Amino acid sequence: MIKVCKFGGSSVANAGQFKKIKSIVDSENERKVIVASAIGKSDKDDHKVTDLLYLCVAHKKYGMSYDSLLEEIRKKHQAVIDELGLSFDLEAEISRLKDLLDRKENKDEIISYGEYLSSRLLALYLNAEFVDAKDVVSFNYDGSLNIELTKEKFLPFMETRKKIVVPGFYGVLPNGIIKTMSRGGSDITGSLLANIIDATVYENWTDVSGVYVADPRVIQNPKLVSTITYSELREMSYMGANVLHDESIFPVKEKHIPINIRNTNKPEDLGTMIVDSSDDKDSVITGITGKKDFEIISVAKQGSTNEVGFLSKIFGIFDNYDVPIVFLTTSIDSFSMIVDKNSVKCSIYELANEIKTRLECDEVTVSGNLALVCVVGRNMRAKKGMAGNVFSLLGDNGINIRTISQGSDEISIIVGIDEENFTKAVSCLYEGFVK
Ligand code: ADP
Ligand code: ASP
Ligand code: MG
């Protein structure tokens, strides 16, 4: 019976937080595998170590000095070392980091330093064994996780009688080069290790007491969800509820291992359980989330609905430009592809123009300023008129709906609106459905 516990950036933000972790970890023998993020913010004006490392890389790129940034990173770790009375050669580690920056080595190795350092310190403080992610967490060359190889490398460490601390967020490619995951990736490391050791539960310790129906930065004191399914959380986290990385759901889901979101600052709170399925029929809506920064490419061509292969030709052009389509909405002879602005590395107008000329379309337009708002709930499919309610609530509040999408599993309804209406839309849906 082993639990994997991942502690996020705010949970390792300073010596006081390290003390809270120690009391959580020591209170249960089953809490044997610990995954740590880099030192995060102690308060809202503070800086995350990972952000400082990204800044160092950017300063290096533009020939600017990064000494003051390195000093800030050093001070944050030194404060933890001093207050906890740890014996650790920080100077040697910082000069190794400086050396990597000077030599302009692998950028990912530099970025991974935040997790590496916090985990070294945490292992020392917990009297646990430090297992470097570069020696266990393995990727394939395409960036996907190699679960089998990670298992082969990690299981021997489980024979130790000590607790184990592993840095989150990074691993190695088959050639041994360090690779980091996308932001918030320590959640994935925790999930991966939980899968490998068949953990009884994957505890994800953060700064909130679980998953709220809506983002607490948008809605004041939102309702807490006690149980939610993997599919619902996947929809919510993909659509902006960044309490958990959306990709971290897959490894634990595969083994039916529950995720328990817990609050490091309030360990007595039971948090949210994320499970395969739930019989709870009380709440119809489990989440109201959303994201800004989307664009729509709309394609119109007379008769195209009957043209075999028309859509696949459009998709082929998106593939060539390496732009993923987030959603597709269709009407007769017209199709709208919604894309995340940040994933478009090319010129979106070039892509649109290629569709227009190659497929001889009547019209191809690009429009931006789109936010998506998502209403999630496994019990929505049994409830009549849900989509109508969403549209009326938005309409009554003067919010124009630009796109509509509902998956065939009817677990979510996603609407596209103007970005300036984002907060208003989340608020009125919350008022209407939850309050
Ligand atoms: P960590 O550093 O522990 O990984 P994150 O900052 O990544 O923590 O995630 C926790 C944060 O997620 C919370 O502080 C909260 O502001 C934000 N969040 C966004 N949406 C939600 C939601 N629906 N429920 C809970 N937290 C949410
Ligand atoms: N430190 C990394 C980040 O800030 C990874 C993580 O916290 O999960 O994105
Ligand atoms: Mg996180």
Image (spheres, helix red, strand yellow):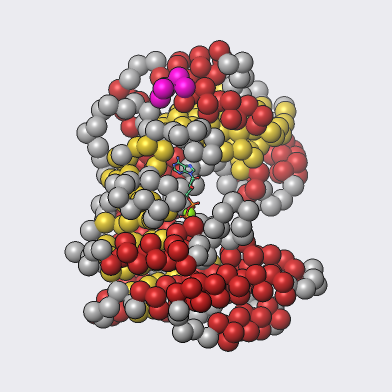
Q: Residue at x 44, y 33 (%)?
A: 222
Magenta stretch holds residue 432: yes
Q: Which image quarter is the C terminus in?
A: top left
Viewer-side residue, 322 vs 207: 207
Inspect this view and state whether residue 239 appears.
no
Residue sitting farthest toward the left: 1
Inspect this view and state whether residue 94 appears.
yes
- Relative to 328, say whether 51 is above or below: below
Residue 324 falls left or right of residue 285: right
Quadrant of residue 20 in the image?
A: bottom left
Q: x%, y% of residue 76?
A: 57, 69
Task: State whether the magenta stretch is mostly helix, strand or loop.
Answer: helix
Q: Residue at x 75, y 44 (%)?
A: 350
Residue 222 falls left or right of residue 40: left
Q: x%, y% of residue 105?
A: 65, 79
Residue stretch rendered in magenta on the structure: 431-435
Q: Residue at x 65, y 23 (%)?
A: 302
- Relative to 374, say whether 168 is above or below: below
Q: x%, y% of residue 168?
A: 45, 66
Residue 405 falls left or right of residue 213: right
Viewer-side residue, 146 vs 268: 268
Magenta stretch holds residue 299: no
Quadrant of residue 333 in the image?
A: top right
Q: x%, y% of residue 275?
A: 28, 45
Residue 233 falls left or right of residue 170: left
- Relative to 347, say whether 307 is above or below: above
Q: Which image quarter is the N terminus in?
A: bottom left
Q: Residue at x 42, y 72 (%)?
A: 122
